[in-house]
Amino acid sequence: MNIILIGFKAAGKSTIGRKLSKRTGMDFIDLDSYIVQLHDEEKRENINCREIFNKYGERYFRELEKNALNAIKTENTVLAVGGGAVESEKNRSRIKRLGKVIYLFNNKDILFSRIENQGLPPFMDSDNPRESFETLFKKRDLLYKTVADDIIICDNLSYEDILDEIIKVME
């Protein structure tokens, strides 16, 4: 069985995914890292997701994301999926088929604070970041909920508590 972690940017998907992998002995794939790898293979350019998005645009980035999702054929793996992958209906369908989908829900104020601290991503309006965040959060929250088999509310939970909740869902 695969465990697919979804949620907004800065929800902790990659961190939780790595920790879950260590605890369970499952493999771990970070979809964003896989996107970077695919881009490097295609363009011979080793840059991060933000740089790919900024330099080549959202359309190119989303195509890489779709290709990365379609290339995953593993079992017994934890997969951390980028926050925007659910915007494509085909991606949502693929995510559902890959395994048990867990939405790591975080309070939007906590998420916005984390995002501000990390630097605004290219998909947010730098002139009005809070408003663009609110709009995107509302849209994606609905999509995450339609894809998720389970929702874990991460507010005020430690990593260990979140892992315990995921393990319960897996049993």
Image (cartoon, helix red, strand yellow):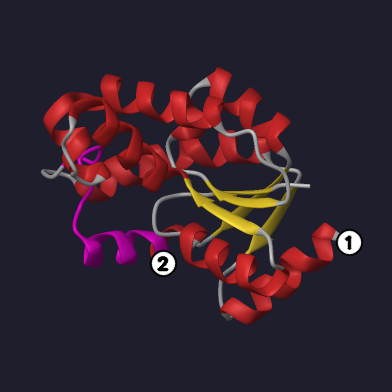
Specify start and end residues of the magenta stretch as a single range.
Answer: 111-125
Q: Is residue 125 above or below residue 9?
A: above
Label 1 is placed on what type of residue?
Glu
Give the label on residue 83, or none. Answer: none
Marks 2 and 1: in contact by CB < 8 Å?
no
Instruction: Look at 11% across and 43% down and name the residue there.
Output: 127
Spatial CA distance of label 1 from label 2 is 29 Å
Q: Is residue 140 magenta?
A: no
Q: Does the magenta stretch include residue 117?
A: yes
Instruction: Look at 73% across and 40% down and name the residue there.
Output: 99
Q: In which quarter of the image is residue 147?
A: top right
Residue 19 locus on image (x, y percent): 57, 71
Identify the residue position indicated by label 1 in the image: 171
The quadrant of the rendering that contains the C terminus is: bottom right
Identify the residue position indicated by label 2 in the image: 110
Q: Quadrant of residue 82?
A: top left
**Could you say whether the residue bearing mark 2 is in a helix, strand or loop?**
helix
Q: Can residue 39 be seen in this view?
A: yes
Residue 145 locus on image (x, y percent): 65, 40
Residue 143 placement, left or right of 131: right
Relative depth, front residue between 101 and 128:
101
Residue 87 placement, left or right of 165: left
